[in-house]
Each structure stands twice: as structure tokens, then as C-alpha cells.
Image (cartoon, grey):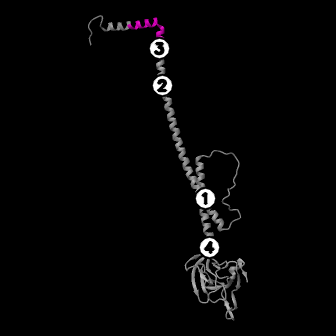
């Protein structure tokens, strides 16, 4: 670019003008120092305010980030607590199941001496310094208790099965009297026939009774016969499933049909004097593996009275 050769508009002239204005500004500032100081302070305050706002925003952003981290940590801790609470609930349910099973075993095994009282809290204690338990140690302890519960539950279930089998075997053996509170009027074996005289082998034992007295099953079993049998009158027979069959004769009424399950002590008939009989009584027989046996060996343990 070319400039006209003019003293007032050329580059040299413009430079001179700028220099003059700069000197004039310095001279004015020198003549008015308070104004200069105020301008400088205003510029500094403006710059300081800008820096203060920026610092406040930065601190606020940091606080928001910290609060977000705290909230996330709380949510994670709550999830862990919920998981532990669920596991604790499972262990409590398992403990309740084992307690119920233990109480059943106490009843079945007739362990009533207080040693196996599952409703009583267990006494524990200890000494030494107490410390905070790490999460990993707590989870390992819960896992160990769960395994112990599972093993104990299996062992108790096996024991329950054995005890119940044993109890069923005991209940299936004739060991009770067929009528409550009565005495024996005629025993097992050879005797004088009460109707025709002479000698007769009596296959069972007779209990005195009144017509209508309840006749009771002496053991658990299934009714295998219910009806009239020659000489026996109204008769009930019970198969106990272990080679034993019991017979109850001369009843006035039969109250159990064939095929029905009966428990020891339940009524199966009403006493009477049907069939070959001289009066109301209960004729009771025990058969073992198809052979008639002496009922006294089963009733002796109950102290049945003789007439």
C-alpha cells in the first residue's frame, strides 16, 4: 500500500500522533492520581469478583459430587444390609424348623427330663477384647452356620425316621387291654367248658364287661374281618402288619368296617354276649404268624387284673 506524500496523513505522522496521545494520558494521570487509583481499584475489584465467583462455583460442584458419592455408598450399603437380612431370615426359618423337629423327637423319644427343652435360650459367654467384625468374616460365619444347620437337619430327619419306625413297631405289637378297667374272668389254655362241661382248650382270655362297653384296639392296624364268626358271634379281627393278628369276639355291635385303619386305644366294637357265650364279656385272642399264642405275655406289662 502507498500513502500520499503528505505530512499530516503518512505513517510517520500517525506514529507521532499516537505518541502524543500517550504522553497526554500520562500527564493527565499524573495531574489526577486519585482518579488513576480509583480506576486501578475498580479494575482489581472486578477481576477479584470474577475470581471469587469462579471459586464458589468450583466448590459447589465439588460438594455436589461428594453428595452423589455419599448417596451411592448409602445405596450400596443398604443393598448389602438387605442381602444379609434375607440370609438371616432364612437361617431363622431353618432354626425354627429344627426346633420344631427337635420338639417332635423329644415327644417321640419320651425325652421329658428338661435336657432337650428347645424353648429355653442357650447359655453362652466369653471374655477378651471385642472388635468390629469385617464383612467377609460375617459372611463366612453365616455360611458356616447354614452348613451346620443343613447337616443337623439331615441327621435329625434320619433320627426322626428311626424313632417313628420304632414307635410304629411298638404301637403295632399287642400291648394294651381290649377293655378299660376290667379284669380277666377266664385265662388262656385248658379249662372246663362253661357250657357243656368237660375239657376245652381256650384260645384266648376273657374280660368281664357290660353290654355296650367300648371294645378297644390293643395296637395299630387294619381291620381284616368284621362280622359273624361261628361260635364267636360278632367278631372283629385286626391285622397289625408285623405277623400279629388280634381277635375280639362276642360283641353286641361292630363299629369298624373291613379295611379301616385303627389306632391303639380306639373303639372297634361294643361288648356283648353274642355267639357261644354265657354272659357279656370280651373274648380276646392273639395270633402270631398264623399260630395262636398266649395273650398274657403282651398284657402282663400293663398289670391287667385277674378276677
Reading the image, the residue beneath label 1 is 96
Which disc number belongs to residue 168?
Answer: 4
Which secondary structure lies at badge 3?
helix
x and y percent of residue 255 in the render?
Answer: 58, 79
Instruction: Verify CB contact (< 8 Å) between mark 1 and mark 4.
Output: no
Of the two numbered discs 2 and 4 on the same chain, state the one appearing first in sequence. 2
Instruction: Tell me how far mark 3 sits from mark 4, CA to CA.
Output: 108 Å
Looking at the image, which residue is at 35% across and 7% down? 17
Reading the image, the residue beneath label 2 is 53
Q: Tell me the crowding category of disc 3: few under 14, some 14 to 19, or many 20 or more residues within 10 angstroms, Cα based.
A: few
Of the two numbered discs 2 and 3 on the same chain, state the one appearing first in sequence. 3
Please name which of the two marks, 1 or 3, marks the residue nearer to the observer.
1
Reading the image, the residue beneath label 3 is 40
Q: Tell me the crowding category of disc 2: few under 14, some 14 to 19, or many 20 or more residues within 10 angstroms, Cα based.
A: few
Q: In this view, does 75 lie to the left or right of 306?
A: left
Of the two numbered discs 1 and 3 on the same chain, state the one appearing first in sequence. 3
Of the two numbered discs 1 and 2 on the same chain, state the one appearing first in sequence. 2
Instruction: Tell me how far mark 1 sits from mark 3, CA to CA.
Output: 83 Å
Instruction: Tell me how far mark 2 sits from mark 3, CA to CA.
Output: 20 Å
Please name which of the two marks, 2 or 3, marks the residue nearer to the observer.
2
Instruction: Verify CB contact (< 8 Å) between mark 1 and mark 2.
Output: no
Q: Is residue 192 magenta?
A: no
Q: Residue 146, can we see it?
A: no
Of residues 89 and 40, the one nearer the viewer is 89
Instruction: Tell me how far mark 2 sits from mark 4, CA to CA.
Output: 89 Å
Part of the protein shown in magenta: 21-43
Amino acid at each position: 500500500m502507498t500513502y500520499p506524500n503528505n505530512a499530516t496523513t503518512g505513517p510517520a505522522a500517525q506514529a507521532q500522533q499516537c505518541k502524543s496521545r500517550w504522553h497526554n494520558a500520562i500527564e493527565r494521570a499524573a495531574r489526577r492520581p486519585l482518579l488513576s487509583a480509583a480506576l486501578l481499584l475498580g479494575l482489581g475489584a472486578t477481576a477479584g469478583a470474577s475470581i471469587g465467583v469462579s471459586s464458589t462455583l468450583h466448590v459447589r460442584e465439588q460438594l455436589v459430587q461428594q453428595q452423589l458419592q455419599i448417596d451411592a455408598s448409602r445405596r450400596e450399603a443398604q443393598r448389602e444390609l438387605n442381602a444379609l437380612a434375607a440370609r438371616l431370615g432364612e437361617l431363622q426359618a431353618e432354626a425354627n424348623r429344627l426346633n420344631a423337629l427337635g420338639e417332635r423327637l423329644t415327644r417321640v423319644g419320651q425325652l421329658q427330663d428338661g435336657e432337650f427343652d428347645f424353648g429355653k435360650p442357650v447359655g453362652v459367654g466369653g471374655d477378651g477384647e471385642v472388635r468390629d467384625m469385617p464383612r467377609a468374616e460375617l459372611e463366612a460365619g453365616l455360611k458356616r452356620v447354614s452348613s451346620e444347620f443343613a447337616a443337623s437337619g439331615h441327621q435329625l430327619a434320619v433320627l426322626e425316621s428311626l424313632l417313628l419306625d420304632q414307635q410304629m413297631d411298638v404301637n403295632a405289637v399287642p400291648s394294651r387291654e381290649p377293655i378299660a378297667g376290667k379284669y380277666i374272668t377266664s385265662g388262656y389254655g385248658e379249662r372246663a367248658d362253661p357250657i357243656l362241661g368237660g375239657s376245652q382248650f381256650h384260645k384266648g382270655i376273657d374280660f368281664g364287661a357290660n353290654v355296650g362297653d367300648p371294645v378297644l384296639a390293643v395296637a395299630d392296624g387294619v381291620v381284616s374281618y368284621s362280622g359273624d364268626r361261628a361260635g364267636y358271634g360278632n367278631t372283629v379281627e385286626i391285622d397289625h402288619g408285623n405277623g400279629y393278628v388280634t381277635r375280639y369276639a362276642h360283641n353286641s355291635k361292630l363299629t369298624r368296617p373291613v379295611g379301616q385303619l385303627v389306632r391303639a386305644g380306639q373303639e372297634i366294637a361294643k361288648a356283648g354276649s353274642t355267639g357261644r357265650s354265657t354272659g357279656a364279656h370280651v373274648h380276646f385272642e392273639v395270633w402270631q404268624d398264623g399260630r395262636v399264642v398266649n395273650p398274657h405275655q403282651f398284657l402282663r406289662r400293663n398289670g391287667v387284673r385277674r378276677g
